[in-house]
Amino acid sequence: MAVTTRLTWSEEKSLQKMLGNVSLRLLYKSSVHENKTSSILDKCSCQGPTVTIIYIRNTTVGVFMLGPYSKTYDHLKRPNPSFYFSYQRNIATEMRTAVLETEIKIASGQLVFYSSGQEVLSVCLNDTKLSINDSLSKALGVYNRSDISYLECEVFRVEGIEDDTNYIRKITRAMKHRNPLLSELRTYKPCVDFVSKVRILLLGPVGSGKSSFINSVKSVFQGRLTRQAAVGSDVTSITEQYRIYPIRDGKYGDYLPFSLCDSMGLHEKEGVGLCMDDIPYILKGCIPDRYQLNPNKPITPNHPNFISTPSLKDSIHCVAYVMDINSINDLSSKMVAKLKQVQKEVLSCGRACVLLLTKVTNCSEFLQDNSLNMDKPMTSQSQIMHVSKMLSVPIYNTFMVENYTSEWELDPLKDTQILFVLRQMLRVAEDFFEDLP
């Protein structure tokens, strides 16, 4: 009879995607191969990269290790790239991760995982008990106590990892930065009391990736890919309403204190795309959410939905110009003139602005060993200098991102870049608040 895993289809797919579209081969299952260290060693020694998974009622806890299990019972292996993860099934199939350099010791009927010389997780095979230390249990969202009874322990061999060490180091570095960024944004609060939510407006040509960026941000906080904002083609804007998208932390979590605002894309032709006369009213907060935009008929103060006396909390606090990095050199003179006109209006309203270049395909270059490397690759320098000068946006407020478009699963490399860009936008908005009289 075939031995099957307890992993759900979605859990297995998300784990495979995170590790680079690998295959998982089940080597050991405690209910079949006995709860003994000798059994796990016989099945898993010298098998290369492995994933060890422990099932606890509605929670799944796992450890990925690039280094193999060893048959030396009391040998403490040197640290190797690894990460811990968990799925909370009773809330949603959402993976939470923690990156630690891991050492493993197998002795006295236990698997003991160490980081920096401290025991972080131990599995007592004989008694089917699991213990997790405080910091790791908090990071994984697992109820913290010792001697947790578990249902099953499984070990998989990870097959098909390309450039084993380099790729896994990139993934672990990405998650090492991703998690602190996510925590920082989840606890973010505007620096002024009279603004409860920062509003960021995305402006740019049709098909530049405005709606895709909104979907990407929402996906990272939801823990799954979501496409609430409708995405159009490169020539036709599908966004016809002015929308204010709140960002929820998780499926049932609270709304975070920032929103992303979307509108029609800009078009070089008159009577197509966002009407220029609507822009100052959007910036000042005079246009409500879900207002139906009309390229030929801008809103007026006489409109029944017009907000005649908006407060600062209703207005836009940061404008992000969204541009396709591959189309910058192909912008027509009419489109360039329109973008300059928009920027003139934004500056006259005193709003902060950033430049967001989308459809970048080398996001892994932004991760260095110990820090985020957001310096622009040399291949993009000429385009960046060109559009930065054109819109009068400083280089230090110019960012690049690779949105989620056709993917089915989240990627920690993309997550890290998206979160970094969002944090920088909020910091630019903070500068705007600080400059208020």
Image (cartoon, rainbow, N blue to C red):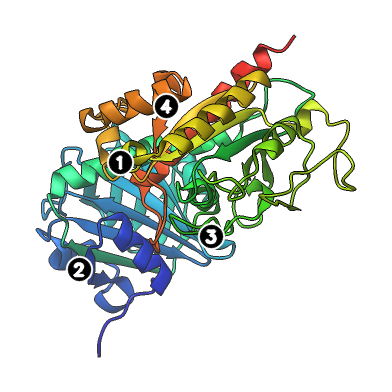
Please provide percent x and percent y for residue 300. Answer: 82, 40
| Residue found at x 48% / y 45% | 137
Q: Is residue 153 above or below residue 108?
A: below
Q: Amino acid at mark 2?
A: Ser
Q: Amino acid at mark 4?
A: Thr
In the rendered image, which residue does mark 2 sit on?
39
Residues under numbered marks 4 and 1 in contact, where contact means CB atoms less than 8 Å apart: no
Q: Tag on residue 227? A: 3
- Nearer to us: label 4 or label 3: 4
Q: 253 or 65, which is in the foreground?
A: 253
Q: Amino acid at mark 1?
A: Cys
Cα separation, mark 1 vs mark 3, equals 21 Å
Q: Amino acid at mark 3?
A: Arg
Q: Is residue 11 left or right of residue 43?
A: right
Cα separation, mark 4 vs mark 1, equals 15 Å
Mark 4 closeness class: few <14, some 14–19, many ≥20 residues within 10 Å? many
In the rendered image, which residue does mark 1 sit on?
363
Quadrant holding the C terminus: top right
Q: Is residue 426 above or below residue 265?
A: above
| Residue found at x 77% / y 30% | 313
Q: 337 or 134, which is in the foreground?
A: 337
Q: Tag on residue 398? A: 4
Q: Is residue 280 left or right of residue 183?
A: right
Please provide percent x and percent y for residue 415. Answer: 41, 45
Which is nearer the N-term, disc 4 or disc 3? 3
Please provide percent x and percent y for residue 269. Answer: 53, 46
Kindly tell me whether residue 107 is visible in this rendering. Answer: yes
Cα separation, mark 4 vs mark 2, equals 55 Å
Which is nearer the N-term, disc 4 or disc 1? 1
